[in-house]
Every structure is written in structure tokens, then in C-alpha cells.
Amino acid sequence: MIVLPKIEAAARTDVGRARRSNQDTFGVDDELGLYVVCDGMGGVAGGEIASRIAVDTFLQIARQELLSMNAASLECTRCSLLRAAAAANRAVLARANFDIALRGMGTTLVAARIAGDFITVLNVGDSRAYLFQHGEAEQLTATQLTRDHSYLAEQVRCGRLTEAQAARSSLQSVITRAIGVDQDVTPDLYDATLQPGDALLLCSDGLTRHLTPDDLAAIVSESTSYSADDVCARMIHLANARGGSDNITCLLLRANPA
């Protein structure tokens, strides 16, 4: 008999220690297993508006698409998420075109849908999704499911920079894909399975600038007796303790035994 996990979801966002406002936004639709995190850009007002429009539009359209299809198949999920991302892109771009003060605003977007024990993840930009699973000797490991759409990540992938050089670069905020910047957007899609005891984290780069995958895995592993909300709080606290150079958002999905 297949035992499907029971999802415990929690999310927190924090302004960090260097910013005056929070341009991150998250959204949750537990009924359909939809979760999204956006990290806005384009000035204080623009970033906040772009990320909110993207989250709201993404959830609205993904929900409409999934309910109209009335199916939980992988293909339906992938199609729904892609259409939702395209709608979010159009909505942010339309608002920026309408208000000249918001020209140039945009946002990253990372989202997941969980249906049974299956995960579909979509991303645009450098907000990330991590999957935590128990490996050898029951040690919890963190696997980054998404690929950053950023200048530095692309330089590392093509061998022009090392990870260490990229970490020291002043170009941390330069992304190569975003919601609301161009007429068309090309998200990446990833599939994975979620077993009881696993966890999925969606986060903005304000978290991953200060915490390594090993840091994140250690917090999740050491916090089994804590709620998912407490785990998010611990992640944010550590990121702030190490500098808090950007807004910090984490959305944690823990797969508990049903």
C-alpha cells in the first residue's frame, strides 16, 4: 500500500537587516497544493507591487486551470503552472506599462504543486527550491531542484567562474530571467517525488546568500520536534545573524506520515 504524505506548510518573510522595505511575497493554496514565492525588483514600490501581482495572478490562474482540467496528472499540472506563469508575466508587464513610475519592475518566481506524492516545481529567476531527503545512514541532505537564472550562476555553469569567485562577486543581484520584464517568459520545470519524512523549501535569495544547503539541511534535521513555522523562523534568524543583506522569505513544506 502506498502511504501518501500529509503536508504541513508554513511560510515567513522578513525585511532583513539592510533593506528598508520588503519586496518579497509568498502565497499558499493548501486545497490545491499550490505554493509560490516571489522576490521583486525595480525600486521600493515597484518590487513590492511586482511580487504581489505575480503571486496573486499565479495562484488565481493556476487554480482556474487545475479546476477546469479536473485532473491531477503530471501533464495537467505542468500545463497549468506554465499558463499561470505566463499570466503573471503579462499582469506585471501590463501594470508597468500603465504606470510610468513602475517601468522596469519585475520579480523572480518559484512555485510548487504537490499532488499526492508528486512535486512539480517551476522557477524564473534566482529564487530556489530545495528538496530534503534522507540518504545514507539516514542523514538528511538538501538538493537544489532549480537552476538560478542569474549572471553569476551562468558564469559558473560555463566554467568562467568558480563557486568561490561567484560568492565574492558584487553582481549577486543580476538575474537573466524575470517575470514582467519581457513580452514572453521561459520558466524551467522540475519533477520530483515527496515521501513521508521529506521536506521542500521555496525561498528567496536573501536566505541562500547566507545559508548553504548543508546549513539548511542541518536546521531541518535538528527541528523535527518543532513546527514548520518554527523551522522557518530559525532559518530567518540565522540568515539575519550572518548579515541579513536582503529580504528573506522561506516557505517550508514538510511531508509528515498521514
Image: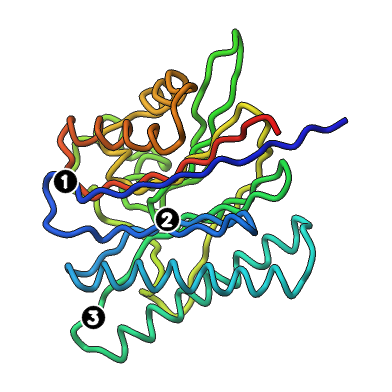
Q: Quadrant of the C terminus?
A: top right
Question: Quick check: 36 left or right of 159?
Answer: right
163 and 245: which is toward the camera: 245
Badge 1 amino acid:
Ser
Is the residue under label 3 in contact with that under label 2 (CB below 8 Å)? Answer: no
Q: Which mark is residue 102?
A: 3
- Which residue sits at x=78%, y=57%? 73
| Earlier sequence position, callout 2 versus callout 3 | 2
Badge 2 amino acid:
Val
- Which residue sits at x=36%, y=74%? 181
Question: Where in the figure is residue 30, as x and y percent of width and height?
Answer: 58, 55
Question: Quick check: 98 left or right of 6?
Answer: left
Quarter of the image holding residue 125?
A: bottom left
Q: Which residue is mark 1?
A: 170
Badge 3 amino acid:
Leu
Question: Where in the figure is residue 47, as x and y percent of width and height?
Answer: 26, 67
Q: Secondary structure at mark 1?
A: loop
Query: In the rendered view, would you say 100 is above or below 140?
Result: below
Q: Secondary structure at mark 2?
A: strand
Q: Mark 3 or 1, which is nearer the eye? A: 3
| Earlier sequence position, callout 2 versus callout 1 | 2
Query: In the rendered view, would you say 241 is above or below 157?
Result: above
- Which residue sits at x=41%, y=54%? 149
Question: Quick check: 74 left or right of 221?
Answer: right
Q: Which residue is mark 2?
A: 37
- Which residue sits at x=52%, y=55%? 35
| Residue positioned most to the top | 137
Q: Mark 2 or 1, which is nearer the eye? A: 2
Question: Quick check: 47 left or right of 192?
Answer: left
Cα distance in 3D space between marks 2 and 3: 21 Å
Quarter of the image holding residue 176?
A: bottom left
| Earlier sequence position, callout 3 versus callout 1 | 3
